[in-house]
Amino acid sequence: MSSYVKKCSECGSINLMINKDKGEVICRDCGLVIEERMIDFGQEWSEFDSEQSEKRRRTGAPMTYTRYDRGLGTDIGQKGDIFKLQGKGMSKFFRLRKWQYRISTAIERNLKLALAELKRVASYLKLPKSVEEEASRIYTMAVQRGLVRGRSMESVVAGALYAACRRHEVPRTLDELSEASSIDKKEVGRTYRFVTRELGIRILPSNPVDYIPRFASALKLNPETQSKAVEILEMAENSELTSGRGPTGIAAASLYVAALLNNEKRTQREVADVAGVTEVTIRNRYKELFKKLNLKDQMKEKEEQEEKQK
C-alpha cells in the first residue's frame, strides 16, 4: 500500500491508496474505487548483473526506417539454426523461407534494395545516423506515395539523402552526392526538388557558415583563419552579399580572404578544388567582398605591421 497523489471525485479527499494486487486506486475515506485494472510497468524479474539483464530482457531493438520492415520483421533461418535440423524439417523451413521472400510486396522489395543503397552512400559520405534515419524516412514516404515510378531508385535515394542533409544542417554538396551515387548532378537536384515539393518538406536555405569547418580542415588552415572567415561571412550577410549566391562559393571566398589576411596564403585553385566550384566563382566573390566590406584597409594594416616587425 502507498499514497497516491490525486483527488477522490466523490468526496474530494486526497487520502488514497493503491492496491497493487488488484490494480486499483481506492479512497480511504469513502471507499470509492477511483481507478481499476491498472498496468504495472515494473519489470517482473530480479537482475543482479548485466549478463542476467541481457538474458532476461525480451524487448528488441528500437524501430528504425533504415530497415524495410522498420526492424520489426522476423527472418527464417538467418542464424544457422535451420542447418541443425535434419531431413524433412530442414526442407520444410527452406520452403517457408522461400515463400516468405516471395509473398513480400512490391514496396518491400523496393525498400530492401533502396535502403541498402542508401546505407552505402551514407557510409561513403560519412553521414551521421540521424541523417541516415531521416533520409530513410523520406524515401519510405516517397515510395508509399508512388513518387519513385518513372525515376531511377538511385536518384531518389540521392535526393532523399540531400534533403536529410539540408534538414539536419550537415553540409554536403550536390557534387558530393552525385559522385557518391554515380548520378548526374542535375538529376539529383531535380529529384530532390520534386520529392520535397510533393511531400511538403520545408527546407531552409543553406548557411555558408556550415561549410567553413570542412573547407578549413581540408585546406589545413589554423583556427584563427577559420574564425576570421566566419567574421567575414557575418559582415557579408549584414551587407546582403550572401543573398542570391551559392553558399559554397561565398564560404570558399571568405576562407580565401581570411587566409590572405592571416598570412596563410592558398591559391584560388586549391580553394576552388576543395569547395567544388570554379576559380572564376572564387575570384568574383573575392572581389565583391573586398569592394563592399572595405577589406583593403585591413590588408594595408597587415602589411604595415609586417614591415614594422621586420
Image: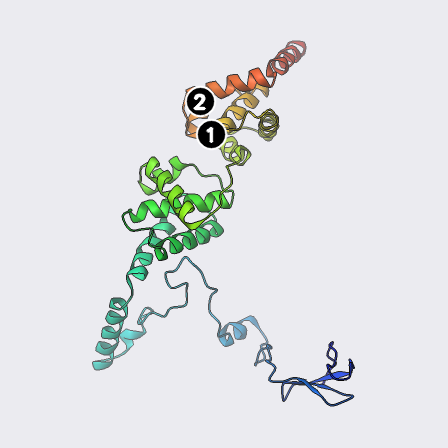
Q: Is residue 168 above or below residue 220?
A: below
Position of 211 compared to 107: left or right?
A: right
| Residue 221 x %, y % | 54, 28
Position of 201 compared to 94: left or right?
A: right
Discs 1/2, front:
1
Q: Is residue 268 above or below residue 198?
A: above
Residue at the spot of label 1: 246
Q: Which mark is residue 281?
A: 2
Q: Pointer 1 and pointer 2: residues touching (CB < 8 Å)?
A: yes
Closest to the observer: 242 or 43?
242
Q: Is residue 307 above or below residue 208?
A: above
Closest to the observer: 202 or 310?
202
Position of 126 compared to 16: left or right?
A: left
Residue 38 visible? The answer is yes
Q: Residues within 10 Å of mark 1 (few under 14, many from 20)?
A: some
The residue that appears at 41% across and 57% down in the rendered structure is 66
